């Protein structure tokens, strides 16, 4: 797309721009200012010559003397006295008559005041004003000040440098001495004998001074639409009037006003007039102040300052933004939008009005979309005017659910000036605008309320330069497009470190009613000249100020830095190590290993192994999620993961861990979601020296990938129809999602049913800071369906054996307070162990700075009294992480139970009678029961608690005690079983 035309134009000569910048901090170019008052820049030919304002005792004889060329008509002139305390005028004395010739064509006129008529505070001042209202001099004694009101309004006085202390006797004054014809030729002296009405002692008029030109313009300010007769200028001369004098005239800005090239002062007169013509341009360049100058050979040049008032229509950024989520001018063409460029991107620039309105709800910043790199003249600090169309841009398109950002598109840009100071950044936090701390949006955009709604708060700052101080990281540095020219980094921060509720390790966690709008993501995406953000961990801080512009992308408002951030101050957050397990504790973990495949390189396998062995202390059973096939994301039909798993097991062994075995069922190619071609699945790792996996084969020819495992009442009690097995793999609930993996384990004589899960992701939900409020959880219905399926499966196990030991674990991709988790626990059959931790420890994942729980271990009611949980924080809070999830580790205290028999019921009956033997220490799969007569029953059905054996009395049994035997020993029943005839 062709770059919009860029017009570069200078509206000030260098010196005038410097003056404006100095006096008005750069704002004159962009705002409608009141007309500048005339203040002579010429050598003062009429001037204040003598002052008396204070003496010992009662002040008396107070007076001010004016000196100048003889014959000067003082009609319309005045002396205005100013009080330096507050700067207001307090007395105006009109002058009249003409100046007499007392010495070499010069003379004096004095004005007397009553006692205490001239104030003697420190400081006070005197303004000499000519008949045109132009301040010729604004002098002060005993200091300087700024005049407030009157003809000298806004002018800063010039201290004459000498004063009367009040201790001098009556009859003295402050006087000019020296030789010359203009004020600048003389100097003020300490109190001396007063000479009001006569040249001062030591003062010689008419000597040494070069004749001077003076310029005045009436009116001194006018509209650029005033045309040819906008104002009348007068050029005057001192000295001899014997001959004609040709004077050269110059306008410092001919694009605003023009004057004739020259004017002639005829012989015999001291002045001539000329016309000043206004130039009506089409640019909104603001009011322009500059000089009209006069020069002639042998004369000191003179000049006058004028202001040309801009008459173009201006559209302000705050009017484009409005107090709303979208612009009230969307689709409209806007003209002459003024502002200062605060930051530049590869396809546009950020523009901010340095003259804000009084409404915090209306942003003063906007992004100007140029589609390609802006012209080089559009640099930071440039003052520009923009014409274009107001648009609302949705990053990624409407289907993302993102908010829109207001932009000016198809722009025409006029550069007014460069090198201007930037608008002061708006502080977010202490000492500035404090963001809401709980509500993101609670009225579906019905009310625009930046004070209480997080979305509205950041919208009111969209495109503006902002500053956060002493920020604290609540998430690790994220790196995007790492190693490329487009690499950028982001860190979620809390301004001033303020926010709640906070985790035990320095983050900020979510609750059902608080998703933390006070978080702000800081990014370095603007350009390569902005230094990379450092690698930060949760709790690290940035003492000092971070400055940048507010923008929006990927569902979040972001602060894009415009310079380096302060040096990082590390919090030295440590990776956690689980406590040592006791021998009778079964340790079970869930760990999402984030798309693990051979292509990740040995370093990742080694890092995972170090975490499993060193931080988790080699759990007895692990449910791993996101294990990919042998060639990772290559989509070539390969589904087997044995190479991936063997590499991990070898790395664990090399790290000092056990020689784990694994159980896995390969998915159908491209049917389980995740990274394309990767075929992620759930896998069980187990330590065979600590636990036994109960392998139970399916019928020959069974496709385990698509055949559902079921709970059956088998020879040993509640069993899986085959182990391992996938739960309802063809149910639509698991379309494009991982299928749960169920397996039977044996530990210390206790049989456990372990179900590993990886529910569908939250991808597809609309963003927290999105256009749908409250956010639409598009992914949640499928997780509810998956939870329903798993809950029903657990119910089927418990229907066979209410005491069955059940563990359900994995990456469930939802929060502990979510509907899917409630569905999974429906009927009170499962218990989410993480809810037993303190609330500020209930998290396993950090997303956009929000600490939250996606990973869970749930246990049935039989195991709950002996269960504990630890979230082992080694990943999600650190910039250097082997996975984006934390592993969860549970401990189940399941000691070996002594073998005992307490009763047989019934204790009599014929062969074929079903009996129940109660006791302790019965082990599923390895318990045998022997009746008198040498008849042995094996296997027998044992309940999950190991406290009941259910069997049928075999043929051939005879009356006598019953022998129960396991690998732990053998025991006989306390009483006999009586075999009767049918």
Image (cartoon, grey):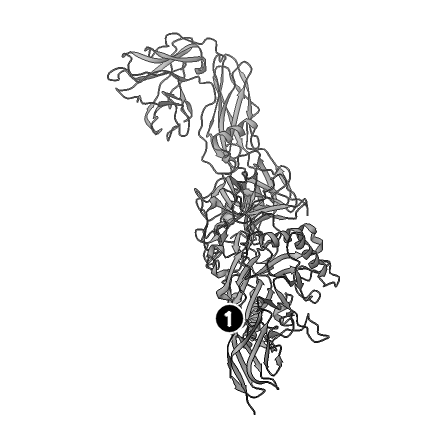
Image quarter for residue 652? bottom right
State whether residue 768 appears in this view.
Answer: no
Query: Mark 1: which secondary structure?
Result: loop
**Residue at image coords 30%, 21%:** 118
Image quarter for residue 284? top right
Q: Where is residue 671 in the image (x, y as percent from the top left)?
A: 68, 66
Q: Position of residue 469 (x, y in %)?
A: 48, 41
Q: Quadrant of the C terminus?
A: bottom right
Which residue is the extreme one toward the bottom? 982
The local crowd at label 1, few if under 14, some if 14 to 19, many if 20 or more residues have their Cα within 10 Å, is some
How many labels were placed on the picture? 1
Q: Position of residue 74 (x, y in %)?
A: 38, 20
Q: Nearer the viewer, residue 784 or 380?
A: 784
Which residue is the extreme one toward the right? 636
Q: Position of residue 391 (x, y in %)?
A: 57, 52
Q: In this view, does 326 lie above or below 413?
A: below
The residue where tag 1 is placed is 829
State whether residue 336 appears in this view.
Answer: yes
178 displayed left or right of 848: left
Q: Nearer the viewer, residue 125 or 562?
A: 562
Q: Nearer the viewer, residue 893 or 871?
A: 893
Q: In this view, does 264 lie above or below 359?
A: above
């Amino acid at each position: 797309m062709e770059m919009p035309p860029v017009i570069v134009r200078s509206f000030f000569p260098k010196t005038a721009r410097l003056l404006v910048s100095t006096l008005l901090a750069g704002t004159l170019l962009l705002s409608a200012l009141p007309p500048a008052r005339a203040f002579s820049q010429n050598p003062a030919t009429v001037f204040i010559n003598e002052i008396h304002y204070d003496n010992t005792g009662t002040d008396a004889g107070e007076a001010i003397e004016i000196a100048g060329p003889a014959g000067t008509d003082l009609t319309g002139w005045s002396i205005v006295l100013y009080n330096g305390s507050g700067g207001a005028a307090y007395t105006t004395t009109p002058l009249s008559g003409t100046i007499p010739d007392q010495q070499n064509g010069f003379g004096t006129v004095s004005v007397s005041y009553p006692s205490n008529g001239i104030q003697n505070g420190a400081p006070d001042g005197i303004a000499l004003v000519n008949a045109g209202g132009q301040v010729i001099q604004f002098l002060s004694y005993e200091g300087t000040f700024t005049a407030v009101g009157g003809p000298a309004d806004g002018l800063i006085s010039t201290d004459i440098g000498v004063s009367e202390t009040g201790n001098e006797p009556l009859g003295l004054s402050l006087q000019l001495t020296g030789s010359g014809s203009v004020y600048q030729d003389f100097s003020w002296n300490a109190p001396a004998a007063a000479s009001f009405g006569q040249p001062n002692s030591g003062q010689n008029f008419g000597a040494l001074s070069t004749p001077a030109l003076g310029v005045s313009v009436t009116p001194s300010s006018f509209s650029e639409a005033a045309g040819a007769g906008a104002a009348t200028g007068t050029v005057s001369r001192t000295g001899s009037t014997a001959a004609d004098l040709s004077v050269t005239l110059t306008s410092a800005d001919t694009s605003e006003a023009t004057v004739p090239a020259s004017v002639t002062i005829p012989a015999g007169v001291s002045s001539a007039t000329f016309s000043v013509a206004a130039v009506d341009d089409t640019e909104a360049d603001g009011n322009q102040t500059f000089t009209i100058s006069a020069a002639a050979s042998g004369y000191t040049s003179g000049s006058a300052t004028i202001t040309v008032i801009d008459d173009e229509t201006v559209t302000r950024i705050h009017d484009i933004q409005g107090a709303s989520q979208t612009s009230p001018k969307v689709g409209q063409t806007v003209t002459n939008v003024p502002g200062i460029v605060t930051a530049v991107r590869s396809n546009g620039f950020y523009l901010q009005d340095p003259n804000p309105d009084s409404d915090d709800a209306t942003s003063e910043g906007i992004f100007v979309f140029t589609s390609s790199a802006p012209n080089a003249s559009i640099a930071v600090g440039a003052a520009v005017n923009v014409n274009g169309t107001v648009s609302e841009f949705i990053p990624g398109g409407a289907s993302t659910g993102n908010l829109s950002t207001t932009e000016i598109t198809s722009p025409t840009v006029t550069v007014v000036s460069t090198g201007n100071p930037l608008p002061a950044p708006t502080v977010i936090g202490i000492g500035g605008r404090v963001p809401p701390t709980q509500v993101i949006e609670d009225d579906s955009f019905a009310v625009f309320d930046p004070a209480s709604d997080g979305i509205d708060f950041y919208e009111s700052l969209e495109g503006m330069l902002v500053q956060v101080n002493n920020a604290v990281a609540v998430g690790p540095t994220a790196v995007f497009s790492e190693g490329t020219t487009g690499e950028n980094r982001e860190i979620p921060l809390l301004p001033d470190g303020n926010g709640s509720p906070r985790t035990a390790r320095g983050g900020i966690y979510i609750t059902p009613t608080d998703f933390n709008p006070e978080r702000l993501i800081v990014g370095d995406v603007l350009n390569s000249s902005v230094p990379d953000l450092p690698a930060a961990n949760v709790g690290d801080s940035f003492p000092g100020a971070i400055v940048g512009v507010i923008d929006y992308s990927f569902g979040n408002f972001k602060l894009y830095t415009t310079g380096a951030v302060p040096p990082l101050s590390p919090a030295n957050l440590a990776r956690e190590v689980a406590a040592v397990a006791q021998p009778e504790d079964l340790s079970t973990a869930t760990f999402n290993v984030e798309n693990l495949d051979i292509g990740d390189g040995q370093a990742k396998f080694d890092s995972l192994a170090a975490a499993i062995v060193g931080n988790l202390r080699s759990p007895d059973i692990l449910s791993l999620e996101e294990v990919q096939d042998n060639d990772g994301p290559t989509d070539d039909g390969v589904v087997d993961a044995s190479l991936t798993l063997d590499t991990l097991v070898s790395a664990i062994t090399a790290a000092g861990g056990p020689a784990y075995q694994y159980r896995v069922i390969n998915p159908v190619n491209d049917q389980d979601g995740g990274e394309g071609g990767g075929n992620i699945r759930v896998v069980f790792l187990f330590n065979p020296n600590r636990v036994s996996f109960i392998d139970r084969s399916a019928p020959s020819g069974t496709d385990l990938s698509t055949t559902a495992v079921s709970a059956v009442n088998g020879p040993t009690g509640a069993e899986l129809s085959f182990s391992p097995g996938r739960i309802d793999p063809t149910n639509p609930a698991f379309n494009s999602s991982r299928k749960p993996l169920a397996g039977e384990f044996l530990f210390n004589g206790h049989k456990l049913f372990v179900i590993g899960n990886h529910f569908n992701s939250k991808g597809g939900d609309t963003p927290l800071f999105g256009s749908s409020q409250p956010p639409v959880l598009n992914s949640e219905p499928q997780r509810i369906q998956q939870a329903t399926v798993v809950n029903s499966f657990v119910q089927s196990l418990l229907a066979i054996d209410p005491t069955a030991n059940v563990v359900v674990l994995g990456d469930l991709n939802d929060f502990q307070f979510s509907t899917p988790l409630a569905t999974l626990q429906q009927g009170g059959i499962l218990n989410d162990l993480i809810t037993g931790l303190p609330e500020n420890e209930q998290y396993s994942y950090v997303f956009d700075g929000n600490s939250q729980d996606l990973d869970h271990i749930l246990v049935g009611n039989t195991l709950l009294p002996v269960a504990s949980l630890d979230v082992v924080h080694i990943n999600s809070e650190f910039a250097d992480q082997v996975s984006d999830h934390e592993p969860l580790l549970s401990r189940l205290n399941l000691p070996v139970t002594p073998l005992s028999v307490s009763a047989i019921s019934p204790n009599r009956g014929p062969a074929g009678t079903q009996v129940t033997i109660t006791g302790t220490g019965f082990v599923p799969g390895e318990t045998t029961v022997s009746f008198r007569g040498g008849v042995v029953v094996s296997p027998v059905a044992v309940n999950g608690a190991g406290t009941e054996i259910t069997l049928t009395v075999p043929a051939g049994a005879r009356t006598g005690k019953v022998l129960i035997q396991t690998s732990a020993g053998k025991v006989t029943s306390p009483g006999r079983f009586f075999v009767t005839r049918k």
